[in-house]
Amino acid sequence: MNRAALSGRAYRLIRLAAALLLTAVFWGCHEDRADGVVRIGLPEEPRTLNIWLASDTNSRKILSQIYQPLYLRDPKTLKLIPWLAAADPIYDAGEMSYTVRLRNARWSDGTRLTADDVIFTAWVINEFKVPRYAAKWAVIQRIETPDQHTVKFYLKKPVAIFHARTLTTPIVSRSEWQTLAENALTTAKPLRTLQNYEVTRPVGTGPFVLTEYRKGAYLHLEPNPYFFGTGQVIGGYLLGPYVKGIVFKLFGTADVAVLSLQKGGIDMFWASIQPGYLPLLKQHRRIKVYHNQKSALYYMGFNLRKAPFDDSNLRRAIATVIDKTFIVSRILQGYGTPMPSFIPPANSFWFNPHVPQYGKDLSMARRVESAGRILADAGYTWDRPPSVADGRPVPGQGLRLPDGAAMQKFTILTPPADYDPRRAFCGLMIQEWLRQLGMPAFARPMSFSSLLDQVKGQRDFDAFILGYGSLNLDPDYLRSFFSSKNDKPRGWNMSGYRNARFDAVAAKSSEEMDREKRREMVWEMQHMLIEDVPYIPLYNPDVLEAVNKERFFGWVEMVEGIGNIWSFCTLKPL
C-alpha cells in the first residue's frame, strides 16, 4: 500500500511503530555493549542544536555538554572559576578593562581555540543582535588580542555583571561559523537566516561530541578526545569524562520516564520529579533521589499603582497572615524552602538573612492578631474586628479603609491548576487567610498567557501569584524587577514599585566592581523590598532528581540539581 492510500491516522501510526522499533533496536544494541554509557531521560526533544536559537531547556542541556564558556560556577561555593579561561580575569579600574588568558584548548575538530574565536563570538552577537546575549555584550567598547591566548575587553563603563553574565557566554568556533554568518548578512533577515541554519554536528570545546541524533528517539554523545579538562583538577574535581558516552532518550511524559527509570531503562531522568512519584521510586533499592534547591522565586505581587494596594501597611498585614511554612509543608509536601527574601538562601553570598520576617513562627491566630494590629494602627476599621477565641482566629467582618470606605472585592490571579497546581492552591489558601482579616479576597485561575497579558500588558489587576523558575545566580535581577524605569507596559517591574532610594542603590550596585561592597548594597536592596512589600516571596521548590545508583557514581550536587557539567565530567561506572 502506498502512502497516498493511507489515511492520515494510519500513516502516523506506522511512523510511530517504526520509531518505536528503531528505538528498541538501538537500546538493544547499547545493552549488549559493555557498561559505561550513561542513559539520560529528557522530558522533551530539544528544539534545536543551533546555539544562536537555543532558548528551551532541553536544547541547552544538550549544548551545555558541547559549547563552553570562559568561566562557570564552582558547584560548592557558586563562585565563578576559570573554565576555558586559564585564570581569573584581571580588572584594571583605570582602563576599565578585563584581561583574560585562555587555556591551551582545542575544538572537537582538533583545531586550537584562540583569541580570534572569542572576538568572533562577540562579533556575531553584536552584529546580529542575538537575543539572550546582545545586552550582555553591548557593554564592551572594544576588544584587543595581545596574542592568540589573551583577550582584553575594554568596557564603556564599570559593569558589575560583566564577569557573571558576559564571560559566562558559550564561545563558538570561528572556522565553523564565519562563512555561515557572512552569508547570513547578505540576506533580508540576517538573524533569522543565522538561527534557521540546521546544525547537525556542532563543534565545541566541551567534554562530549554529538555522534548520532534520531529525532523523536535519542541523541548519542561520545567523549571529546580533545577536551581540555581531561586529567585536569578544576574546582577540586579530577575531570574525565570517565563514561563511554551519553545517550539522551526522549520521553513524552514523566510517567513513561519514571517507569523506564524503575525498570532500569535509563540511569537518570533529567527533570525535577513531582513528589507524587517518590513513593513509587523509594520502593526500588537501586534508585536514589537527590534533593537540591533551585535558584527560583515564587511570589505574590500587588498593583501598587492604585488603591488599596498602594498602602504598604496593607501589604505588610497580608505578608504577616501568609503562612509560608504551611505552603511548603502542605502544598509542596515538604519539598521546598520558605522564601524570606528575593534571593534564595542557597545563594548564600548574596542572600540577606537579616530582613524582616513577618509572622515568623506565629500560629495562625497570632498571625491574624498581629496583622490586625498593623491595620488598626494604620487607620483601618471593621464592622467586627478579627479576634482570637480559645486559641483560634475569629474572622473580621466589614473591613474599612482609612478613609472609611468599605474595602471592595479584589482578585488574586493565579495560573490554572493543570498548569501549576502549587500556585493555584496557594491562591486559594491566601484567599482564606485574608478573609480571616475581613478582606473580600477571591482567587481566580486563568490561562498563563492571559494572566501575563493582564499583569504585564494591560496592567489591570489587583494581585497575582507568579514565579521565576530559573533565576541567574547574580542578583542584578533585583534591579530589573523593581527599578522605576522598568515600570512600563510589558516591563519587568510588574508591581509598579517606585522608590528613589532603591533606584539609587540599585544603579550604584550595577557599577560596583568590588564584590564585598556590592554585597552590602544588594543586602540593603533586599531590606528595602521586604519593608515595602511590592511582592511577597513565598517559596522555592526543591529539585528532585532520581538516578540508578547501581550503575554510576559521582553525581555532583549543586543549586539546580545534579544535572550539570560537573556530574558528566566526573561520573564513573560502578
Image (tube, rainbow, N blue to C red):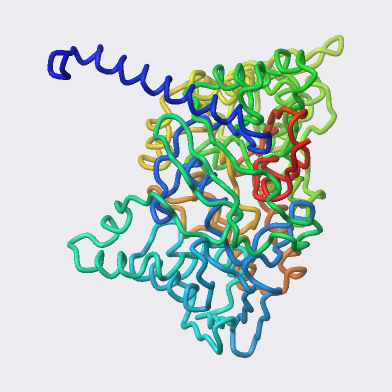
Residue 62 visible to an observer of this rendering: yes
Q: How far from the left and from the top, in percent, is residue 375?
A: 69, 33
267 sits left or right of 165 in the view: right
Question: Taking 348 as reference, is 542 above or below it?
Answer: above
The count of marks equals: 0
Residue 396 sits in which quadrant? top right
Residue placed at 17% from the left, 62% from the top?
188
Q: Is residue 398 visible in this depiction of the protein?
A: no
Q: Is residue 44 left or right of residue 11?
A: right
The residue that appears at 40% across and 36% down in the rendered structure is 460
Image coords of residue 106 (percent x, y):
56, 68
The residue drawn where x is 50% and y is 21% is 253
Q: Residue furthest left?
A: 4
**Residue 459: % across, % down:** 40, 40
Return the residue nearer the eye: 392 or 420: 420
Front-most of 393 and 108?
108
Examine the rendered structure and indicate whether residue 237 appears above or below residue 250.
below
Left or right: 130, with 566 as reference point: left
Determine the residue positioned at 60% across, 58% down: 225
Give coordinates of residue 126: x percent, y percent: 39, 70
Residue nearest the observer in this picture, 29 or 93: 29
Q: Quadrant of the N terminus?
A: top left
Image vertical order of residue 172 relative to residue 117, above or below: above
Horizontal side of 36 relative to 13 (left or right) equals right
Q: Quadrant of the C terminus?
A: top right
